[in-house]
Amino acid sequence: MADSDTREKLVGAAERLFAERGADNVSLREINRAAGQKNVAALHYHFGSRRALMVAIFEQRMAGINRRRLEILQSMTADGQDGDIRSVVEAMVLPLAEQLAVPEQNSHYIRFLAQAVADPNLDIGDLIRGRFDHGFARTRLLLRQILTSLPSLILEQRIQLAGAQMVYALADKERRIAKDGRHTDELWLFIDNLIDAIAGMLAAPVSSATQHRLNKSEKLTA
C-alpha cells in the first residue's frame, strides 16, 4: 500500500474514533487497527504524535473549508454586504454546513470538531492558528466592526457562543444524518434557520439584567 493511502486511512480512522469517543479516549493502537494496519508503528511513522495526527485531520478538512469561507467573504465584500450581519454569519456557517450536503461523503469531521471544542485539555487555536483559520478570523473581525453598539465583553462572549452554537448544532445534525439519512430540503431549512438564529443572538439587545451584571463585574475589576 502506498504511503499516501496508508496516511489517508489513518486520518480517516482517527477522525471517526475521535468523533465517537474523544481524542483522550482512543489509543494509537486502536487507530492503527481501525485503519487496517498490521504494523503497530504505522501511525508513529507517518505522524510521530497524536498532536500531529490531529493537525492532519484539520488540514484534510479545514483547509478546504477555509478556502470556501474566504471565497464567500470575497464575494460578499464585492457585493457590498460585509456590513450585513446575516451575510457575515452565513460566511461563518455555510462552509462547514455544506459538508453535510455532500451525498457521497460519510464524514465524521463535524462531530470530531465538536469533541475537540469540548475538550478542556485541547487548545484548537494552537493547532490551527495561522494555518486554516484565516476565513473565520475575518468573520470575527467583521462582526466586531458591525456590532459596535455592544459592550466589548458581551460581544466577545457572543462571538464565542456563536462558534460553539454552530459546531454543536451541525455536529448533532451530522449525527442524525448518519442515523436517519440525508433529507436535502429539511437540511437546507435547518442551515438557513441556524444562520438566522446565530445572527439574531449576536445582534440581540443587552437586557437590563445582563447590563446590571456587567456593571457589577466592571466595578469589581476596576
Image (spheres, rainbow, N blue to C red):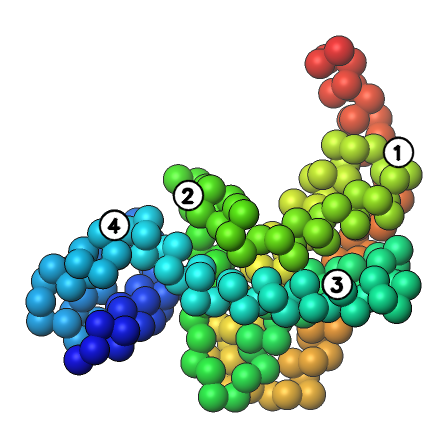
- How far apart in space, not on screen, are marks 4 and 3 (Cα)? 35 Å
Task: Name the residue beneath numbered marker 1.
Answer: 208
Q: Do we see residue 98 in this rendering?
A: yes
Q: Measured from the top left, where is residue 134 in percent x and y? A: 62, 53
**Between tags 4 and 1, which lies in front?**
4
In this orientation, which residue lies closer to the viewer: 165 or 72?
A: 72
- How far apart in space, not on screen, are marks 3 and 2 (Cα)? 28 Å
Quick one: label 4, few (<14), some, or many (20+) residues within 10 Å? few
The residue drawn where x is 85% and y is 66% is 78
Closer to the N terminus: mark 4 or mark 3?
A: 4
Amino acid on which the number 3 mark rests in the picture: Leu
**Between tags 2 and 1, which lies in front?**
2
Q: Is mark 4 on a helix, strand or loop?
A: loop
Task: Name the residue beneath numbered marker 4.
Answer: 49
Looking at the image, residue 12 sits to the left or right of residue 148; the answer is left
The circle drawn on residue 122 is 2
Closer to the N terminus: mark 4 or mark 1?
A: 4
The residue drawn where x is 47% and y is 88% is 104
